[in-house]
Amino acid sequence: MTGFVDKPEPVQVSGLVHVHTGKVRDLYRNEAGDLVMVASDRVSAYDWVLPTEIPDKGRVLTQLSLWWFDQFADLVPNHVVSTELPPGAPADWEGRTVVCRPLRMVPVECVARGYLTGSGLVEYQESRTVCGLALPEGLVDGSELPAPIFTPATKAEVGEHDENVAYEEVARRVGADTAAELRQLTLAVYSRGRDIARERGIILADTKFEFGWGPAEDGTDDGERLFLADEVLTPDSSRFWPADEWEPGRPQPSFDKQIVRDWLASPAAGWDRHGEQPPPALPAEVVERTRARYIEAYELLTGTRWS
Ligand SMILES: Nc1ncnc2c1ncn2[C@@H]1O[C@H](COP(=O)(O)OP(=O)(O)OP(=O)(O)O)[C@@H](O)[C@H]1O
Ligand SMILES: [Mg+2]
């Protein structure tokens, strides 16, 4: 299974070499050797990249990530080099393009959870653990955990599910020191983000970070260090819940593509997500409500108007 209903063609820009088409982002390399990361308006759900785009989503994800990178600058260095458009790039890349350090990505999805839901809830219901970590009795869907936990997963190819793994497995794959550093950074960044979001009426239930190795800042020594990369605390990488509607014991309303998932799972879509057929196009009304949700998240979190 490919995962893409229509796989997009890379854009030809002189001086840029296309290196990767992700579910949401397209990566190019510029002549200086940096990566040019362009966030598209693509949306994925149920392991498919859908045939319909959500206008402005790429710009919202990019601007929100840049805002968060700044909030965390004292905790961890990040991959951003500049937000200048490469010469010759299409004008519509404006606002959704980041020139970044090419990193050796750590092959671990660094997930932090402060609340129980999703795959964490499923594991908890079976074993009272999440990623092998013991949790207290009596937690339900949406419960706040006693303290945030690091629940790593292994990165899957397009069309496959990420898989939760125990901390020991991460240590085995990347070494004990790196595992410890990933856990410490993940929990520090999550905790700061959770506190900022909470002040703005949003619960940051859980999130996924990606880190990569790169040469230390000034390049003068040959040591490498970890950088925060990819996207950070966006509705695609996180679960955001409106704090005033939070009510453990049921699924929480969220600022993300839940609207898309719900529609795809509804009879109106006429689609079997366990079947072989690709998902159908989204109706305009679902597109508009999803777009509004992403913009609302951006405005609430950053405290600035979307323009
Ligand atoms: N600084 C960086 N250096 C190298 N690769 C990076 C850097 N930042 C992000 N990446 C990689 O770029 C890709 C971004 O594409 P996209 O977000 O569409 O990802 P994906 O892996 O297809 O999907 P998902 O994010 O759902 O796992 C990812 O593979 C990510 O690991
Ligand atoms: Mg990604």
Image: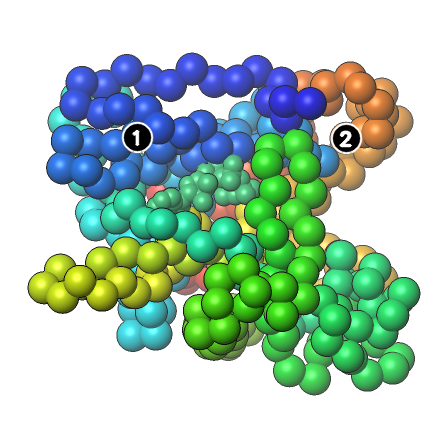
Give the SS element for disc 1: strand
How are the colours assigned in the image?
A: rainbow
Residue tagged by mark 2? 264
Looking at the rendered structure, the kind of residue marked 1 is Tyr
Residue 28: assigned label: 1
Q: Give neighbour class at mark 2: few <14, some 14-19, many 20+ (Cα, 10 Å).
A: many
Give the SS element for disc 2: helix
* Residue 83 location (% of width, % of height): 23, 44
In-image side of 165 versus 229 (left or right):
right
- Residue name at image x 75 percent, y 57 percent: 118
How far apart, in angstroms, are the residues tagged by discs 1 and 2? 32 Å
List the single residue furthest toward the left.
Answer: 220
* Residue 140 location (% of width, % of height): 85, 71
Quarter occupied by the C terminus: top left
Nearer to us of marks 1 and 2 is 1
Q: Quadrant of residue 135?
A: bottom right
* Residue 156 location (% of width, % of height): 61, 42
In-image side of 240 versus 189 (left or right):
right
- Residue name at image x 62 percent, y 47 percent: 256
